Amino acid sequence: MADGRLIVVSNRIPTEEAPSGGLVVALHDALKERGGVWIGNSGKRVASEEAQKGLTRIAETPYARYSFDLTEEEHAGFYLGYANSTLWPLFHHRTDLLAVDPDQARIYREVNDRVAGLIAEVVQPGDAIWVHDYHFLPLAEALRKRGVANRIGFFLHIPFPNPSDMPALSERKLMPGWLSAFDLIGLQTRRDVSNALDFLRDNGAELLLRGKMKYGDRSFEIASYPIGIDVDAFVRAAEEHADSGEHLRLSPGERLVLGVDRLDYSKGLPQRFAAFGEYLSNRPDPKIRATLLQIAPPSREDVEAYKEIRQELETITGRVNGEMAELDWTPIRYIRRNIQRDILAGLYRRADACLVTPLADGMNLVAKEFVAAQDGSDPGVLILSHFAGAAEQMEAALMVNPYDPGETARAIEQALSMPLHERQARHLSLMQTIRATDIGWWTRTYLSALLQREEKASH
Ligand code: ADQ
């Protein structure tokens, strides 16, 4: 096994010297340890001559970071268009929101081709390339066409689509070629693996043994690697910022239910707000005060479906608060901005319950962060959707069907009245799970599987 450098490719690339955020830090550490190169999109939009100029160095030590720019047209077709208006809804089981636009599909492939050209310039024999997420499905095939024979791994952070939804994708016939050009495809859950195997088997690939597949003369492997968080860092941050909750000025005895999500239609926010309203209407004692603090910074605001979800939430918040609020109590507090991670850790710790109720989600790191931030002697309760990837691992959470506001409302009631010994037992079990598969485990396990693959002789 040649022990070359690691080349990470992701849509966005951190620009700061010491980046923050779980995944970014994990990749940063892996690159520091092995040496290598990180390539990603700068986020800048430039004129087309400028985009052609190739990679810009943003850092040289302890490993090289290079960024590329997109033109306005590429940003619209590749990022807002095909990646986030076609693939994202399809992969989150929302074919009703899927856009079919051949120009966007073409631009998506062209950007992947251009990025493959940039990678081909820096790759050396023995390097292992690790590509992240749905923005780059065709990247390995484009690299193989350029003669790159290195090991190429892929990790999909979002769910693999249901095979029965695939006919909605006009480019579905290209997908087996895209996927089989990678050596190792990492997915979040066993369910994702089973969906991917089913889709590929129905489309000309042969399953050999335990996730090993053959498609034409290509062999590749599919397995699940549930992503984790830096548990120790979160525990520390939560302890150090245990007073974050004081910012909220809750009245004595007031219960806090927390939600933290990017504002996205996959996160089940309207259903969650409706469930909280139902909980309040049916609570056994009207003197009980509970506040839902929902932190939801907007994302992808140029995509129509994201504008709509924002309006919908504002309407529900207004309705619930209009009906229930009192002079000194606002039942739903809705914050639409990013919160510093340390403060967030302290808010998790103060919360009596956390609502993680997506309709579809690759993993959901908020579920893990909330558990890590709890005080084990008096922990809060995680309410988790069956449709979060995390549900496969975090069985000790209170599981709910996010489509059923009544069920979620009853889970809120159960969480807020749960006896201490049950809260402690559930928390302990969840803590063991997230520690056993933390972010360090994830990078190590994935990379050691990728490095065990043979470098291809030629393509
Ligand atoms: P996301 O859809 O972004 O990620 P998630 O896993 O919940 O979802 O990660 C969000 C991260 O952003 C968390 O670390 C959270 O703390 C942070 N965050 C959210 N709102 C914030 C706010 N207002 N202020 C500060 N931080 C905030 C995609 C997939 C997921 C998968 C991850 C990682 O959709 O399913 O778990 O990638 O693989």
Image (cartoon, rainbow, N blue to C red):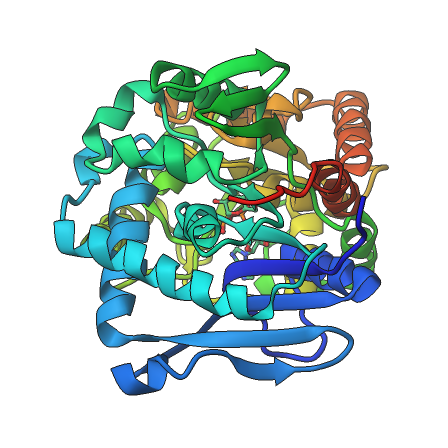
Task: State the image quarter where residue 336 is shown.
Answer: bottom left
Residue 269 location in percent, x, y? Answer: 37, 42
Query: Which residue is at the front of the view, 216 or 321?
Result: 216
Give the residue at x 40% y 39%.
178
In the image, residue 329 above or below residue 182? below
Residue 90 location in percent, x, y? Answer: 29, 35
Give the residue at x 38% y 65%.
114
304 to the left or right of 433:
left
Question: In this view of the protein, can residue 326 be seen by the observer?
Answer: yes
In the image, residue 232 above or below residue 66? above
Query: Which residue is at the front of the view, 303 or 192?
Result: 192
Query: Which residue is at the front of the view, 360 or 17?
Result: 17
In the image, residue 177 above or below residue 12? above
The N terminus is located in which quarter?
Answer: top right
Question: In this view of the protein, can residue 386 be seen by the observer?
Answer: no
Residue 317 location in percent, x, y? Answer: 31, 49
415 to the left or right of 67:
right
Query: Which residue is at the front of the view, 437 or 333?
Result: 437
Task: State the image quarter where residue 277 is shown.
Answer: top left
Seen as rendered, the residue at the extreme front is 458
Give the residue at x 53% y 40%.
182
Residue 127 location in percent, x, y? Answer: 69, 56
Give the residue at x 66% y 20%.
395
The mark tally for this picture is: 0
